[in-house]
């Protein structure tokens, strides 16, 4: 009976250690997607616990007739799938601002708007043996403001993330 109990404990510990994957303490890189008109984002992830992290993303746009920024923050739950694959869910929100400066839009008047938004996040990631993390995620956002930068309150963003882990 004692041998059976010891064997059971060893098997349990081995199975937990095989399924538990350490989330990197920090990861910094790019999240490349449509970002609902804001293009790519600089992305930072910070581990909060063994299976939770905080992600902060900053996207910006600057052109001849427009400029803007968007800052997002998400709390994520990370769950292992197999080998070095994880999937994750997240909730959060952020704020942004944009402006048009074109004589052909809005009778030549400058137009600016600031907005806040709530966001969800679901994705899959692969943690390489080298300190590289690659991910693909889907982030729906619902915005609140005078008028959203693309005249729509719902944004559906799909992006590829590449981050250096340290």
Image: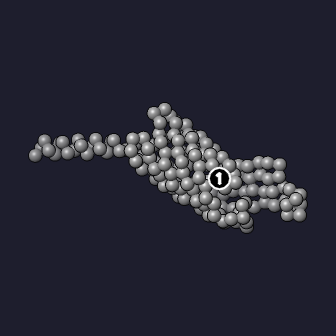
The answer to whether residue 56 is visible is no
Q: Judge left or right: residue 59 versus residue 103.
A: left
Looking at the image, residue 106 lies above or below residue 34: below
Residue 36 in sight: yes
* Residue 154 at x, y percent in the picture: 63, 64
Residue 147 position in % (x across, y down): 73, 66
Residue 81 lies left or right of residue 120; in this view the side is left
Which corner quadrant of the image does residue 113 belong to?
bottom right
Query: Could you say where residue 75 lies in the image, as x and y percent from the top left?
Result: 52, 54
Q: Position of residue 67 (x, y in %)?
A: 77, 52
Closest to the observer, 3 or 102? 102
Single out the residue that lies furthest toward the left: 1
In this picture the colour scheme is: one colour
- At horizontal 49% and vertical 32% (from top left) the residue drawn is 130
In the image: residue 109, left or right of residue 20: right
Q: Which residue is mark 1?
A: 35
Left or right of 95: which side holds 20?
left
From the viewer's perspective, is residue 158 above or below residue 11? below
Q: How many marks?
A: 1
From the viewer's side, name the closer residue of 63 and 44.
63
Which element is circle 1 on?
helix
Label 1 crowding class (10 Å Cα cut-off): few <14, some 14-19, many 20+? many
In the image, what residue occupies the spot 72% across and 64% down? 151
Q: Which picture quadrant has residue 17? A: top left
Residue at the extreme top: 130
Q: Is 157 situated above or below 134?
A: below
Residue sitting at x 57%, y 44%: 161
């Amino acid at each position: 009976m004692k041998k059976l109990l010891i064997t059971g404990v060893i098997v349990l510990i081995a199975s937990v250690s095989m399924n538990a994957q350490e989330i990197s303490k920090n990861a910094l890189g790019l999240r490349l997607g449509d970002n609902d008109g804001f293009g790519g984002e600089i992305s930072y992830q910070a581990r909060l616990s063994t299976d939770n992290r905080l992600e902060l993303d900053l996207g910006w746009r600057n052109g001849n007739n427009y400029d803007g920024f968007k800052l997002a923050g998400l709390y994520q739950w990370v769950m292992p799938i197999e080998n070095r694959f994880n999937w994750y869910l997240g909730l959060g929100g952020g704020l942004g601002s944009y402006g048009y400066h074109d004589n052909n839009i809005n009778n030549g008047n400058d137009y600016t708007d600031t907005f806040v938004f709530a966001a969800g996040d679901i994705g899959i990631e692969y943690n390489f043996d080298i300190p590289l993390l690659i991910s693909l995620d889907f982030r729906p956002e619902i915005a609140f403001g005078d008028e959203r930068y693309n005249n729509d309150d719902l944004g559906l963003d799909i992006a590829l993330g590449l981050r250096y882990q340290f």
